[in-house]
Amino acid sequence: MILNSEIAREYYAILNPHSKKMVLGVLLSAIGTGMTLSLLLVYLHDMRGFTNTFGGFLLSFGAAVSLLIGGPVGALIDRIGPKKVIIVGIVAESIGTGGWAFVQTHRDAIVVMSIQSVGAAFIWPPINVMLTRLTEVKDRQNIFGLNFMLLNLGIGLGGIFASLVITEGSLRSFQIMYIIDSFTFLLFLVVILLIRTPLIGKYIPEAHEPKGGSYKDVWENKKIVLLSISGLILLIFGYASLQAGLPIYATQYLGLSPKWLGIFYAANTISIVLFQPAVLRRLSRESKYKALIAVGIIWSISWGVVGISPLLPIIAGAIMLCISQVVFAFGEMIWSPTLPALANELSPEHIRGRTNALTGLQWGVSGVIGPAISGPMLGAGLESAWIFTMLIGALLPLPLFFKLKKMATKQSN
């Protein structure tokens, strides 16, 4: 069943006054993110004259920065609470995002990417911790799904707006997008400051709970470690390679206008907004481990659809890329509520920040490796080999997901 007023009321009912503000802030910032999500490599190449190789390096560098500080962020969440951590992240994201409008040299780009990457590392782990603490256990998968749906609603709206405003060859139109994106993070900051509850402050352990934790405790939890590794592999051949490669593939290999990028991502996000409720209902009847296996299969299929696009006339190829993003969206609709819900299900409270930081590192590491694979392959004219690599890569973590499922089944017996 697609999104309708009855379903909207059903999911609205799981929100309390605090979590309502939380998801509203995510929605507001996502509108800005949607305006610029698919533009960076095109902007750097077409407007600033940077090579695709440097663009790929920049994405990898940003992911490496997030990776380096991801561990300390998790410890910081456990020590001072997620609210203080996320405030730092939002301010940094606002400064970094707005900074893209003014980069002129390679050094400028590296500095801006550093600031933005620090911001990203300080935002997403505390978001997951805050949503977990603000929601009853039975509703956590739904709250993560609802948050993801609103995130994509914002991204979709931003993408549509960008497709209307961006003018090919116009530096000013790109600059406007980045400045507006920066402003939406400030709106997010205001919303976070209005959330006042001890639930998002430093956790006070009960008498029977450990007083503190460390990453050793996280690494001793074999399920969390296996979940992190398998998820990392999937993200390398999913989100990371899609973000790094599809804009180049579409504009430079297929010869499509940058305006199409907003349309591709709009198709993706609109699908998520419409069908996330139906996917959540199905997920409520399925094992989380089985759901993760399905993600790898779906994403592999989506890469196969991308591979068909160059065989068709240019407009038909563009439509095929839209279809590929709709297929990819169904994998996202399973992944985004399932992975964080499962990670927090496996984690005790005293290491919850570290657990979410560890799973968050999947994005940092994949963000380094994905562009490092996609950039050189596309730069060398190996487009077909790139798609085949992505298709097979999305299937690689399946044996690990099966092992994780087997471990869970054995423990429950």
Image (cartoon, rainbow, N blue to C red):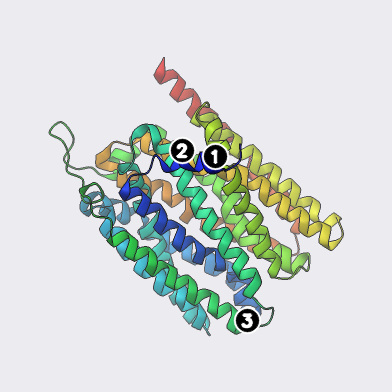
Q: Please state, as top left, top right, bottom left or bottom right, where the C terminus lies in the image.
A: top left
Kind of element beneath mark 2: helix
Q: Is 107 above or below relative to 65?
A: below
Q: Nearer the viewer, mark 3 or mark 1?
A: 1
Amino acid, disc 1: Pro
Estimate how packed mark 1 is, as few (under 14), some (14 to 19) or many (20 or more) residues with alpha carbons within 10 Å. Answer: many
Q: Amino acid at mark 3?
A: Met
Q: Residue furthest front?
A: 5
Q: Nearer the viewer, residue 137 or 28?
A: 28
Lower position in the chain sequence, tag 1 or tag 2: 2
Nearer to me, 125 or 359: 125
Query: Residue 307: percent from the left, percent from the top?
Result: 77, 51
- The amino acid type found where label 2 is placed reads Glu
- SS of the residue at dot 1? helix
Given contact means CB atoms under 8 Å apart, are the residues at marks 1 and 2 in contact?
Answer: yes
Q: Earlier in the sequence, mark 3 or mark 2?
A: 2
* Inter-mark Cα distance, 1 to 2: 10 Å
Label 3, label 2: how many angstroms apart (C-alpha)?
46 Å
